[in-house]
Amino acid sequence: MPATDTVHIHLSDDRNYEIRIGSGLLNEPASWQGLPKAAAAVIVSNETVAPLYAERLRERLLAVYKRVDLVVLPDGEQHKGWESLNRICDHLLGEALDRKTVLFALGGGVIGDMTGFAAAIYMRGVPFVQVPTTLLAQVDSSVGGKTAINHPLGKNMLGAFYQPERVIADLDTLDTLPDRELRAGLAEVIKYGPIADAAFLCWIEDNLDALLSRDKAVLGYAVRRSCEIKADVVGQDEKEQGLRAILNFGHTIGHAIESGLGYGEWLHGEAVACGMVLAADLSQRMGLMPADFVERLQTLIERAGLPVKPPRLGADRYLQLMRVDKKAEAGAIRFVLIEALGQAGLHSVPDALIVETLAAHGAA
C-alpha cells in the first residue's frame, strides 16, 4: 500500500472531497493545506484522545490558522447528547467565532457525529474536517456526512446531513486503540462484504488474524476498500432516500440494543455485529438466503471476538425500540436484509418473524 491512499467522494452537485488514508498523516503538512481559509480553527476531541493527539494536530494547524482552540468533551456514547453539543456551541459563541471558523473532529464516531452536527447548525453552517482515530470512524462514521446526537428514545434521531471538507484517516492512531474498540470497528468492516462485495468478505475471512494483530498494510486495505464502497453508495444517495439504507445492515437491532441497555453499555460496533447475525437470520426466514450464510457470518463475527447473542430485553421492548428506527415507515419495521452475497435491500418484516428470530437467539 502506498504511503497515502486517496478515496474521492463525488456528490451530485459537484460537492466533492477526499478521504486520505495512510500512516503519519497527522504530521504531514499536505493533510492540512487547501482547506477553507479562516482566522480560527477549533479542535473538538475527548478526554481519552486529546492527550494523545490534540497538541500534535494543533501545532500543524497553527501553520495554517492564526488561532487554534481546543474543546475537550467527556468520552463515551452516553455523552453523545445535548449537553456535549452545547459545550461545543458555548465555546463557539462565547469566543465570538465567525462563520468561517473551521472545526476539526479529532476522535471516534461520537466526536465526529457531534462536531459535524455543531458545524451544521452553528451560524447555519461552518466548515469541518473529520480526523477519525478509531477503526470504526475511519471505515464508516467519518465518511458520508451523517451527523447526529442521541435522544433517550432513539439513537441518532436528532441530526443533519452535512459533509466534511476532508477526512484524514491516520492509521498510526490505531496503535493506541484498545483491543475492544478495534474489534468493534471490525464489525463495520465486515458489514461491507455481505451488502456490497462478496470478494471482500472472503478477503476479511482470510485476513482476520492480520487485522486483529494490527498489520498496517492489511488495515490500510480494509479502510480503503470500506471507504470505496461507502463513497460509491453515498455518491448515489447522499440523503438516504433509497440505496444508502443498505449501509445500515445490522443497525436496526443494533440501535435497539444500544438504546435498550443504555448508551455506552455495548459499543456501537458490538451492537451492530450482533444485529448482523439476527438480520442474517431474518434474511433466511424471509427466504432470501440459505442457512449456511447465517452460519458463515456468525462464525466470522465470533472469530472477531464480537457478540452474537443479544441481551434479553424481551420481544415487546425490542419491537417498541425498533419502531422508532429511522427506517421504520408507517409503523412497519424495515430491515436491511441480504438478498444475495454482495447485495442487500430494505424489507418490511412482519412482527411475528422478528419475534421468532429474537426467540431463536434468546432475546425474547
Image (cartoon, grey):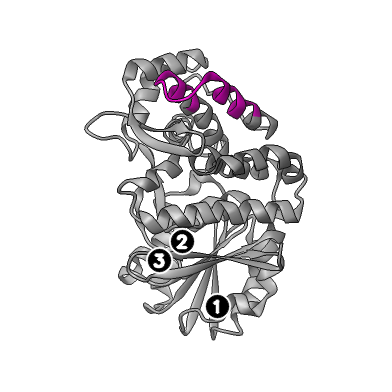
Residue 219 lies, in percent from the top left, at 69, 52
Q: Is residue 309 visible?
A: no
How packed mark 2 is, by other alpha carbons closer than 10 Å (few <14, some 14-19, many 20 or more), is: many
CB atoms of marks 3 and 1 within 8 Å: no
Q: Is residue 325 left or right of residue 213?
A: left
First in sequence: mark 3 vs mark 1:
1
Helix, strand or loop under label 1: strand
**Distance from label 3 to label 2 (Cα)?**
6 Å
Q: Is residue 154 left or right of residue 107?
A: left
- Residue appearing at x 60%, y 57% in the figure: 224
CB atoms of marks 3 and 2 within 8 Å: yes
Q: Mark 1 is on which residue type?
A: Val
Quadrant, the N terminus:
bottom right
**Figure quadrant of residue 314:** top left
| Vertical placement of residue 254 versus 285, above or below | below
Residue 15 lies, in percent from the top left, at 38, 70
Mark in the foreground, 3 or 1: 3
Magenta-highlighted residues: 280-299
| Vertical placement of residue 186 versus 359, above or below | below
Q: Which mark is residue 119?
A: 3
Which residue, given by chain and number where applicable, does mark 2 sit on? 115
Residue 254 lies, in percent from the top left, at 47, 33
Q: Mark 2 is on which residue type?
A: Thr
Tell me if residue 294 is in the magenta stretch: yes
Q: Which mark is residue 68?
A: 1
**Distance from label 1 to label 2 (Cα)?**
15 Å
Residue 121 lies, in percent from the top left, at 34, 64
